[in-house]
Image (tube, rainbow, N blue to C red):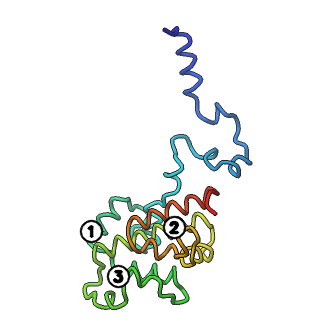
């Protein structure tokens, strides 16, 4: 059995913050290993997900600064306003591209008398906003993010990411992972 002195020394050394243990951060560390600059307790997957407030801003929701993930889920169940999808469509397809019609057809949008999307359409719209925010964080430029989402990608069999994510939640997860790989330099 180890002595109490050895155990207390071990705990003291490893209970210090990461910065104290590793010394000052090397500015080149981020280029070599993005995880080196993450905060203690933060994982690579957590840092990649878009914040609910950013998703709400992309959708143009009221009180976007205080929206939580649970609020977004509740709003999807109730049905988002049709304006959320239209705003996102204008942001992602300013040239009038029709690739977003695979998510909600123009005929379906025209039939919405109450001005609300169905829960399924709302969920797809939130997925789209989430991917848009993640692409913006990855590319740091709207035109590059737009080009990535609308252009064919070799890791998706030549399909555009927008077409893959519009199909299902699983398709959106594929795009989240691809964006994470692009962000951390492991995707071709």
Q: Secondary structure at mark 2?
A: helix
Residue occupying image coordinates x 61% and y 47%: 35
Q: Are marks 3 and 2 in contact (CB under 8 Å)?
A: no
* Residue 139 location, quadrant: bottom right
Dot 1 or dot 3: first in sequence order is 1
CA–CA distance in space, label 1 to label 3: 14 Å
Residue 142, compared with residue 21, is above or below; it is below
Residue 23: where, in percent of width, then height?
69, 34
Q: Residue at the spot x=73%, y=43% of the render?
A: 26
Q: Position of residue 27 (x, y in %)?
A: 73, 47
Please state which of residues 113 and 168 is positioned toward the viewer in this rendering: 168
State the residue in front, 185 or 34: 185
**SS for callout 1:** helix
Residue to which mark 1 is pinned: 77
* Residue picked out by circle 2: 133
Q: Please name the residue that numbered disc 3 is placed on.
A: 82
How far across and how far down the image is residue 6, in percent?
A: 56, 12
Q: Is residue 137 above or below residue 96?
A: above
Considering only vertical position in the picture, is 83 above or below 179? Answer: below
* Dot 1 alpha-carbon crowd within 10 angstroms: few under 14, some 14 to 19, many 20 or more: some
- Give residue 61's quadrant in the image: bottom left
93 horizontally vs 22: left or right: left
The answer to whether 95 appears left or right of 70 in the picture is right
Q: Are marks 2 and 1 in contact (CB under 8 Å)?
A: no
For the residues marked 3 and 2, what is the alpha-carbon distance in whole angstroms? 20 Å
């Amino acid at each position: 059995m180890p002595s109490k002195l050895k155990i207390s020394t071990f705990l003291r050394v490893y209970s210090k913050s990461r910065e104290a243990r590793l010394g000052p951060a090397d500015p080149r560390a981020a280029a070599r290993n993005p995880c080196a600059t993450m905060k203690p307790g933060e994982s690579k997957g957590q840092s990649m997900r878009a914040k609910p407030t950013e998703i709400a801003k992309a959708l143009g929701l009221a009180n976007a600064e205080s929206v939580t993930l649970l609020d977004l889920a509740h709003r999807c169940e109730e049905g988002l306003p049709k304006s959320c999808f239209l705003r996102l469509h204008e942001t992602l397809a300013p040239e009038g591209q029709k690739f977003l019609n695979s998510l909600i057809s123009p005929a379906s949008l025209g039939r919405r008398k109450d001005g609300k999307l169905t829960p399924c359409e709302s969920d797809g719209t939130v997925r789209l906003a989430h991917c848009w925010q993640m692409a913006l964080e990855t590319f740091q430029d709207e035109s590059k993010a737009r080009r990535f989402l609308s252009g064919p990608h070799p890791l998706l069999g030549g399909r555009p990411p927008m077409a893959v994510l519009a199909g299902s939640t699983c398709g959106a997860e594929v795009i989240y992972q691809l964006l994470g790989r692009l962000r951390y330099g492991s995707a071709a």
